[in-house]
Amino acid sequence: MAAGGPHLVIPARQAARYLPACLAGARRAGFAPGEITVVDDGSTDGTGGIARAAGVAVVAGPRRGAAAARNAGARAAGTAGAEILVFVDADVVMGAAARKVIAEILAPGSGISAVFGAYDDRPGAPGAVSRFRNLLHRHVHLENAGPAGTFWTGLGAVRRGAFDAVGGFDPDQRMMEDVKFGMALARAGHAIRLDPRLQGTHLKAWTLGSMARTDLLDRAIPWARLLLSEGAALPEGLNTAPAARLSVVCAGLLVWALPVAPLSPAGAAMLAGAACLVLAAANRAFLVRLRREAGPGLALLAVPLLAVHYACGGLGYAWARVTSPRSAPDP
C-alpha cells in the first residue's frame, strides 16, 4: 500500500459466504489488495483462505471479538504508515464512491477526524424482516446526517492520529464498541460526521427471532449499560430521539394489552389500536420512506415489526437499570 494512504480493515468471523462480495466491493471502490487487511477472528469456515486467495493481507488468530480484531487490523495498517483507517463489516459491500467520499471528507485541513455512512436502499437479503431491519437502520442514519457524537464500523473511517489518541476500540466492550469509541473521540474534541453519501449494501439476512435477539441482547442492553458505565447520556439522535422514546411507550402498551385481552377484549383492542396509531405517527417519516423504497405492503407490516423492535429496546433498558448498581437518567 502507498505510504500515508487509506487502509481498509475488515474483521471477519465465519464470513466465507459474504467476504468475496465484500472484497469485490472494496476493489470497485479503488482499494488495491495491498491496502486491505482481513482479520480472521478464529473462523473455521475458510474465511482466511478466501482472503489469501484474493491477495490481501490476513491477520489470523483465536477468536477475540470484533473490537480486538479491528485493533489488530489497525496495527497491521500502521506498519505501512496508513494515515486513514477505513473499517467495513465483512457482510457489507461498500459503494463504488466510498473511497472518494472518505478522501473528500477527511482531506487535510477539513477539521474532521472521522466519518461514517449508511446502508443503501438495496438490502442483499430477501424477505420482509430482512428488508425492514436493514432499511430501518438506513433511515435512522439518513435522518441524523451531519455532526455526530458516535461512530459506526459498518462503514466508517478515522484518522490514524485520532484513533491512536483514544486508544482504539475497547476489547472488553462486547457490543457497541464502535459507539463507545465514537464517544471517546467526541470527548477528546475530535469532529465526527455522519455522511449518507458513504453507503454500502448490507448482506445480512434477518428473521424475526434474530432481530429480536439482536435488538435486545446486542443493542438495547449494551447501549443502556454503556450509558450507566459512562455516567453520561448517550449521543443525541440515532436511537435516543424523542420519537424513539415514545415508540417504546407504545410498544409497552401493546405488550400490556395482551394479558388484558381475555378480561376485556374491547378494552384491549382499543388500547392496542391507539398504541398502533401513535406508533405509526411517531415513525411516520420511516413509514413514508419505506413505502417509497419497498412498497406499501412492507410499510404496513412495519408497524408490528416496529413494536417488536421497540419492545426489545424498552425491555433491554429496563433490564440494564435493574441489574446495574448505578442509577442513570431516563433514556
Image (spheres, rainbow, N blue to C red):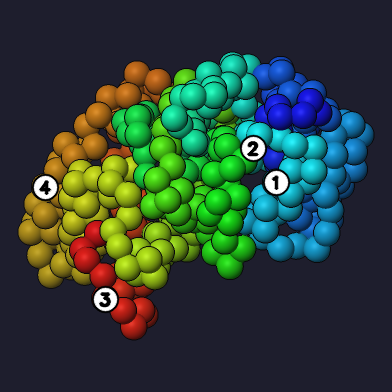
Looking at the rendered image, the quarter that the C terminus falls into is: bottom left
**Nearest-to-viewer mark from 3 and 1:** 1
**Nearest-to-viewer mark from 4 and 3:** 3
User: Callout 3: 10 Å neighbours few (<14), some, many (20+)?
Assistant: few
Locate residue 312 relative to residue 283 in the image: left or right.
right
Is residue 193 placed above or below 218 in the rendered structure? above
SS type, badge 1: helix
Q: Residue 327 bears which disc, if any?
A: 3
Confirm or deny contact between disc 4 and disc 3 (CB under 8 A).
Answer: no
Locate residue 7 relative to residue 102 in the image: left or right.
right
Q: Position of residue 131 (x, y in %)?
A: 48, 33
For image coordinates 77% across by 29% down, the residue present is 3
Q: What's the residue type where badge 2 is placed? A: Leu
Label 2 sits on residue = 85
> Which of disc 1 and disc 4 is earlier in sequence?
1
Q: Residue 230 bears which disc, if any?
A: none
SS type, badge 4: helix
Q: What's the residue type where badge 4 is placed? A: Ala
